[in-house]
Image (tube, rainbow, N blue to C red):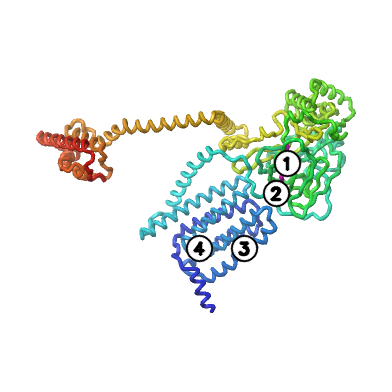
Amino acid sequence: MPGKLVRAYGRLNPRHIPEDSPGLRLSVLAAVLIAEVTIFSMGYYNAIETVAVPALTIAGFTYSWKFRRRRNLLMKFILSILVVAVAVLFVRELATSFLDTRLPLIKLLLWLQVLHSFDVPARRDLKFSLASGLTMIAAGAVLSTGMAYIAGLALFSVAAVVSLLYFQIAETSQKATRILGAGPAQIIAYGAFAWLAGVAMAVPLLLAMPQSTQAKLHSLPISSLQQIFGDFSPKVSNPFYSSDGNPFDQPPRFDPESYYGFNPYMDLRSRGNLSDDIVLKVRSDSYDLYRGIVFDHYNGKGWEISSDETVDVTTDEPPIDLDIPGTSVVQIHTEIKSFFVQTDLPNIIFTSWKPRQLFFPANRIKVDDYGSLRSPFELTEGTVYSVITEQPSYSGKTLRNYPRTGDLPAGNEYTNLPGSEEMLDVARLSQEVTRDYSTRYDKVLAIEGYLKQNYSYDLDVPPQTKDEDAVAYFLFEEKRGYCEHFASAMVVMARNAGIPARVVTGYTGGTYNPFTGLWEIRQSDAHAWVEVFFGSAGWVPFDPTPGFDVPTSQNQKQSPWLAGKIFSYLEDVLGGGPVGNVLASVGGALKSIIAFTLSIPLKLLAGLALIIAAVVWGGRIVRERFLGEYRRRRQIMGSLGEDYSREEVLKEYLALALRLQKQGLVRRHDETLREFARRVSCYVGANEFMDLSVIVERLRYEEVVLPEKSTRIACELARHLKGKLDSREQNPGRTARGLS
């Protein structure tokens, strides 16, 4: 009985011709290893897997090479059992990762490739390995958040091209029953040339194609869930700033690696430039503002959070459903955003307004009275979370009708101000700016416009040395400052006009990276803006800082053209150097061309395309008709030599050759004069052209001087042939032999 099972198993695994090309095996192994290393470089898998998978792949390919001529039934049986074990582990892991199935699926691909590497004796098995590597490198694009993936993709494509060349050589050698002579260096050179040619064709095509502006989120990325069993402090925790004592009784503190607005307080006396390190990468449809902290109490030196009240929100499994008060009187649209933390951050969960569902790696968070979210732990590098938001779309026409009679007030904390003498000057300025307007919305716009037009945004403003109100100092003495100064001035002026307002700190939307499809948010993208209360229409964002605007449905839209995005991104990354200036010029020209093209009506574009096609087609016909004969004459003249015009025989032969070309008889490049003459003789049914060709051959190649009699005979042969060709042109139905 066991023998029968073994024989049956053997029939299921027939012997195949082993592949003996070391170069083919090494190139396929290189492609597979590059795909594996590219995936592991993204940091999603543990160190054991990162080392074990490539090492076992190399071991498997080595084993397959050494025992390629054996059937290895025992090894195949062991591999079959291990495939089942890997499938069971995959199902178990999938049950705990149902929200984000990418990691378990890619891990399954990796381990299946490892097992397959121990059974690649034949060429078809190597083809499967290369296809598996292609699948893995494509799957890696789903996990990628950085530029390293592009390097991995480029290396994989080179190895794949070399592998395909080896496959082609192996297939051709097998069909020809001989081994084609091509060394590794020659194959690599051919592969490099083919790769460069492919890139040269693909890149312009890619740049010319429109790109979707929608973020393709088929799953919601989230880190491994942490169970939080006890309570935790809702206070903002920023490891870069000390929380000892009253910060406003101490000298202002600043750390370039963390924004001072991500604290329970914000000292307006602080100064300094933040670093350009990337802190977040966001997969989003559009540019947006990401709220962090809301401040409502102004003390003359800065801002504090007056309320420590928070609400616990828990869940057994993601998502966390959020019931944050908002507005139901304006149009909203739903967006999904995924956040990839690139460096350690405070325990603030950044999100655009208004979050509805949170997919976060903890079963418990806190929500404060201002709709800000707190994590039970500080966000560390590698943390991933996603948010579903209901984003309101505001319009001036709608907001001018709010607040309405009967709307609940915002609360005194949003209109309170210090009782200092400096506030009287701010109140007079606020009254002067808003006196010509009746609605809350128009008053707010007036304050916002006044600050944008009359004050300068300056990151190098010196520290405030005078002991006076920070907003008054900014408005009446310094007249330049950071976004925090502009936002604070707008809130204080609005409150002086009786309008509830508050300061918000967070991040702007950053820079879109067209290579990764992610928005890159840097430490220097930290920002402060304003929220104003409009009754039942809710809190509405405004931004008085020059050069900044609140994202709207109009200014959030991206261009679909990849070329413009790439030049904009490179210009932003490289800065204002010579290279950056060149890219800025090229990018600006591209944007202008695209904008001009898009402004042309579609019917006009279609008409221009038809006209261009007609001109090209007509030009081709004209070229063939008028230049074809000239090219044919030059070709024949070249074969007759430079002195053809001095010999009557050669001129006659040229005229006959042109007549024959018009009738479809053209001398091939590999054809001698006599071979061509035989075809012509079959065509005309006479040997005159053969006799003429013999004379031309002597004259052309033996360089003899023809006697007058031979010249006369040649001319006579030419006249007879012309007569027969005239006869054929008058009777085109006759069969033309010898055309091929």
Check disc 4 and report its element: helix, strand or loop: loop
| Residue 27 visible in the snapshot | yes
Front-lying residue, 352 or 662: 662
In the image, 136 versus 8, the foreground residue is 8
Number of the front mark, 4 or 1? 1
**Residue depicted at 21% across the width and 42% down the height:** 734
Q: Which residue is mark 2?
A: 384
Find the residue positioned furthest to the left.
709
Q: Tell me the mark number nearer the camera, choosing from 3 and 2.
A: 3
For image coordinates 76% across by 48% down, the residue present is 321
Q: What residue is pinned by disc 1? A: 390
Position in image of residue 114 (x %, y %):
57, 61
**What amino acid type should be assigned to the residue bearing mark 2?**
Val
What residue is pinned by disc 3? 87
Q: Gap in Å between the C-alphas at discs 3 and 1?
A: 39 Å
Q: Which residue is mark 4?
A: 120
**How far apart are the two marked residues, 1 and 2, measured between alpha carbons?**
20 Å
Which quarter of the rendering shows the N terminus?
bottom right
Q: Which mark is residue 656?
A: none
What's the residue type where badge 4 is placed? Val
Residues at marks 4 and 1 touching, judged by CB atoms closer than 8 Å: no
Structural crowding at the residue carrying mark 3, measured as other residues with C-alpha within 10 Å and reported as few (<14), some (14–19) or many (≥20): some
Q: Secondary structure at mark 1?
A: strand
Whole-number angstrom distance, CA of label 3 to CA of label 4: 21 Å
Q: Is residue 60 left or right of residue 360?
A: left
- Compared to residue 682, the image places residue 268 above or below, namely above
Q: How far across and down, in percent of the image, does residue 688 sit?
A: 15, 40
